Image: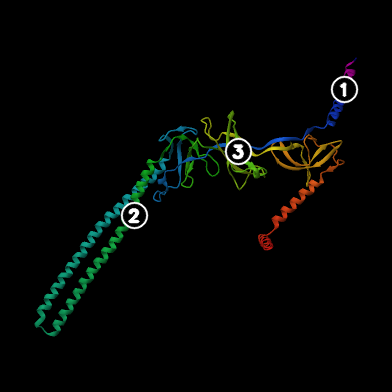
Amino acid sequence: MNKKQVLIFVGIAIIALILILSKGNKHAGDEAITCTVLQGPLEVKIHTSGQLKSENSLNIILPEVLNSQNIRVYDIKITDLVEEGTVVDSGQYIATLDHKVIEEVLTAARLELETANSVIEDAKLDTNVYLSNYRDLIVNSQADVEEQKIVLAESVYESPSVIKKAQMDLTKVERKLEGNVKGLEMRIRQLSSQMERRNIDQRLKKKRVEDLLKLYDALTIKAPKPGMVLYAKDRYGVKVQVGSVLTPWNAVITTLPDMTKLISETFVNEIDIAKIKIGQKVTLSIDAFPGKELKGEVISVANIGQPMPKSDSKVFEVDIRVYGSDRDLKPAMTTGNLIQTGSYDNKLYIPSEAVFETDSTKFVYLKKDKIVKQIIDMGDDNDNYTIINKGLEKGQTILLVEPEKTDDIQTIGWEIYKEQAEKQKQIKEQENVSPEASRADSIKNVKKI
């Protein structure tokens, strides 16, 4: 047998093998995969992934003195920060803020204070000189009055015109004296007001220097109580780190979580959120400790959903309180959460993959003498099973995989479909009834009674 004949023989063998396998697969496909309708207790649970966080955390924020109106420092950089996850005791070091910025501002503030002090000292000297001159003027005016009084007294034997002139001169110097006295009083009030404004400005500048000194001493951040250091996140979800710039409006540096009270923050898709209620029991597993199992309960369910990244689906935040405490647990550990949304003692149920649907009906492929489409009324469901309210009986056989040819398969159970349609109609009618009409119906019913 030459080489060409060998190749022909091998080719024929391969083709024959392919035909045999194809025939075998065809026969295998003819055997439908089935299951049996079950009856008994069933727990409905929703599985989600979550992340541990403290229910109560203490935020370590920028020094409070930074909020003072005198400071006028609107952002400050973190120059040093302990490693995240560090366990600190009360009073231990956590972070350092930028001293250089405060040093520059403090230097400028001290120069401003010195200038304000110099202005006050100069104003005091000018005031003393001015008032001294003004008092000398009053003394001279008083002397003029006394002198004019003597002239008037000596002119008693003079002619009436001389006496008249002496009286007028006396009146003139008295008015001048009175004007100088009033002028001095007004000038004193004016200078006092100016000095008070200078003093206020000086006190503000002094207070600013004092606040800056307090802030400078407070730039070394220490823990107010024992705990584990967790870096804070800004509004964009970015963690604070060395070099981050903080402001009075974004002032959290780190947090110290209370690890004795933990919650698992999880998100539930919009399809299942209606099943989640506050108080439902939860079984939690920890990815880092496969053998550890914890118990908890749902404590909050968000009213507003949020979009999933790179998806049109919406999810709702759900918080689960973890019972007890465990030293092994750390913030941000991943949890598996089994939320028990329902528990039934005796229900018919089938695998969820055995349920098929059209635009208006849900059905199963029921295997009797022949296969039929059985319309069903479904109840609650979990990840694996769906409760059947109507349409099936215990022990019946149903298909898990849709048959190849379905056009000729008979559909039964239309009474269930009609009942469901009637319920939906009643619900819509009830939703469309206005509050006024509802109240009018109530009044009519009362009158009939």
Disc 1: which residue: 11
Mark 3 crowdedness (10 Å alpha carbons): few <14, some 14-19, many ≥20: many
Look at the picture and state if 400 lies above or below 136.
Answer: above
Label 2 secondary element = helix
Compared across the picture, whether 298 is left or right of 22 comes to left
Q: Which residues are magenta?
A: 2-15
| Residue at 28%, 60% in the rendered image | 192
Compared across the picture, whether 433 is left or right of 51 comes to right
| Residue at 72%, 56% in the rendered image | 429
Look at the picture and state if 308 lies above or below 124.
Answer: above
Q: Who is closer to the viewer here, 374 or 101? A: 374
Disc 3: which residue: 281
Question: For the residue marked with disc 3, what is the amino acid?
Answer: Lys
Question: For the residue marked with disc 1, what is the amino acid?
Answer: Gly
Q: Quadrant of the C terminus?
A: bottom right
Mark 2 crowdedness (10 Å alpha carbons): few <14, some 14-19, many ≥20: some
